[in-house]
Amino acid sequence: MSFKLFTANELCKLAADHEFSKLFRSDSERFWMNLVTKDHPPDLVSEMHDTEADIYVVVEGEADLYLGGALVEPSSPQIGQHVGANLEGAACHHVKHGDVIIIPAGIPHMVDARHSRFVYLVIKEDVAGHWRPG
C-alpha cells in the first residue's frame, strides 16, 4: 500500500497548475480541486451537493463555516447542485489557517468571510462516481 503526503502549499500549487493527475492518478475523474479566495464578499451563499463530498484545507485567514440546517430560498442551477441565500438552523464553526474540514455529500454548508480574507483549497469527490463538471 502506498500513499502520498502533501503540504497545504503543495496542494495549492497542484490546484493552481491543474495537475490533478499527480495527486489522483487514473482516478482523477472522481476527484478535482479548486483554490477558493473569498475576500470580504458582501453576500452569503449556501450550497449543498447531492453526490459531491468536499474537503477544505484552510490556507489563509479565518471564517465562520456553517454546517447542516436548511437552505434559505433554495434553487438548483444544475442537477445535484443546490444554492441558497443563507442557512437556517446550521451549526457555526470558526475555522482558520491549517484547519481541514470534511463535508459529506448532502450536507448544507456556507462560508461567512464577510469580515476577513479567506483562502481554502477544496478537494471534491464525486461519491456517486459520475463525471465531474467541465
Image: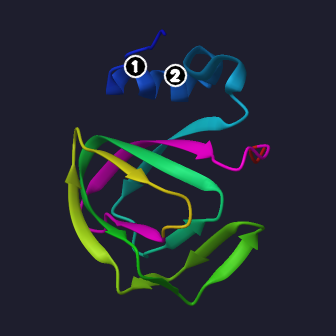
Question: Is 42 inside the magenta-drawn segment?
Answer: no
Judge left or right: residue 130 versus residue 31: right
**Can residue 19 be seen here?**
no
Q: Position of residue 48 (x, y in %)?
A: 56, 68
Q: Which residues are magenta?
A: 108-131
Question: Is 110 inside the magenta-drawn segment?
Answer: yes
Q: Position of residue 86 (x, y in %)?
A: 44, 82
**Can residue 47 be seen here?**
yes
- Count neighbours of disc 2 (C-alpha within 10 A) and say few if under 14, some if 14 to 19, many if 20 or more: some
Under mark 1, the amino acid is Glu
Q: Position of residue 101 (x, y in %)?
A: 34, 49
The residue carrying mark 1 is 10
Judge left or right: residue 27 versus residue 40: right
Specify the label residue 24 is tagged with. Answer: none
Q: Quadrant of residue 84?
A: bottom right
Judge left or right: residue 113 versus residue 33: left
Q: Residue 119, relative to residue 111: is it above or below?
A: above
Q: Quadrant of residue 76?
A: bottom right
Q: Position of residue 31 (x, y in %)?
A: 62, 36
Labels 2 & 1 near each other (Cβ < 8 A): yes
**Quadrant location, the C terminus:** top right
Q: Nearer the viewer, residue 30 or 117?
A: 30
Residue lying at the far front of the rendered structure: 1
Q: Residue 76, relative to residue 100: is it above or below?
A: below
- Count neighbours of disc 1 (C-alpha within 10 A) and say few if under 14, some if 14 to 19, many if 20 or more: few
Q: Residue 15, relative to residue 5: is it above or below?
A: below
Under mark 2, the amino acid is Leu
- Residue ID at (22%, 42%): 97
- Residue ID at (43%, 28%): 12
Specify the label residue 14 is tagged with. Answer: 2
What separation in Å lies between label 2 and label 1 (alpha carbons)? 6 Å
Q: Name the secondary structure under disc 2.
A: helix
